[in-house]
Amino acid sequence: MGSETCSIRTPLLEIAYEESGDPSMLPIILLHGFPDDVRAWDGVAPRLTDAGYRVLVPYLRGYGPTRWLDPAASRMAQQAAIGQDLLDFMDALVLPRVALAGYDWGGRAACIASILAPARVRALVTIGGYNVQNTLGPPRPAPAVEERAYWYQWYFNTERGRIGLEQNRREICRLLWHEWSPSWRFDDATFERTAASFDNPDFVDVVIHSYRHRHRNAPGEARFDAIERRLAERPPIRVPAVVLHGAEDTVDPSHRTERHMTLFPPGTERRVVAGAGHFMPRERPEVVADALLGLLRVSAAR
């Protein structure tokens, strides 16, 4: 069964998503990151539907056809908002329990939903580990080589960076694809299929707010203050999980996830995947699908 493009209205957004598989089976939600879109999961989704699952792949706020309902609403994208979008999406589709997989922004949303609503998450595959940020504490410099890899974040925290992203969004995003997954050989057609999502009229505002808020250079929404305080405490994730990390990820080094494992249930598997950089669902889709399917088999047996 092929995928179908749909949309669902939440309190804030009209969220576009692709759906495939048996609608009567357990839903698996796959969440993309920056700078990417639903095409990241094209190699993963068919493996999950072939195993009998329902698969839902939403466009995050600011990407592709997803739109705000209120043209005058602030285009904010702090981590709590991305997490709430996921919970709102689940509510709108009346999904009492799901499995989640995500990376980058999508991995952060999946981790946050697992913290805020653990009873609704049967299984979690998080690429990059514990992706939750502390947006309240004092900033801590990273090692120099990691700070250099974050050049795009410092750039986006300047007005020059905002204008640069507006004018050169394809050039910047393509460069990040190359830098973050240095051994991945993608062609022009692959990039362009996703780059159309960056033409969303809210893309620049969303990206800029996300990177400024996390570095305390932009305000958040007051309704998320309590959630941000809770997330700043680094609450553990209690749902069954697998942590994946690309061995060649140059923006999130694999040693990061070694420090994260105490924040997951005892016995959680951590796997550093050879031949994968930051965009693992594209580079090693079979690894991501197998991790999800294996985790779901184990959780069903409990």
Image (cartoon, rainbow, N blue to C red):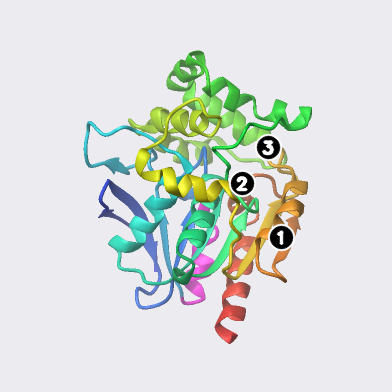
Closer to the camera, 188 or 128? 128
Which residue is the extreme one toward the bottom?
301
Magenta span contains residue 274: no
Q: Is residue 172 above or below residue 16?
A: above
Q: What residue type is labelled 1?
A: Thr
Q: In percent of the image, x 33 and y 56: which residue is there?
A: 88
Q: Position of residue 113 (x, y in %)?
A: 47, 58
Displayed quadrant of residue 252: top right
Q: Is residue 265 above or below residue 141?
A: below
Q: In percent of the image, x 65 and y 53: which residue is there?
A: 129
Mark earlier in primary sequence (2, 3): 3
Q: Mark 2 points at which residue?
A: 279
Judge left or right: residue 261 versus residue 97: right
Q: Main secondary structure of the magenta part?
A: helix
| Secondary element at image label 3 | loop
Q: Name the residue under label 3.
A: 251
Which labelled disc corresponds to residue 43?
A: none
| Secondary element at image label 1 | helix
Which labelled disc corresponds to residue 262?
A: 1
Displayed quadrant of residue 241: bottom right
Closer to the camera, 160 or 286? 160
Mark earlier in primary sequence (3, 1): 3
Q: Which amino acid does label 2 sit on?
A: Phe
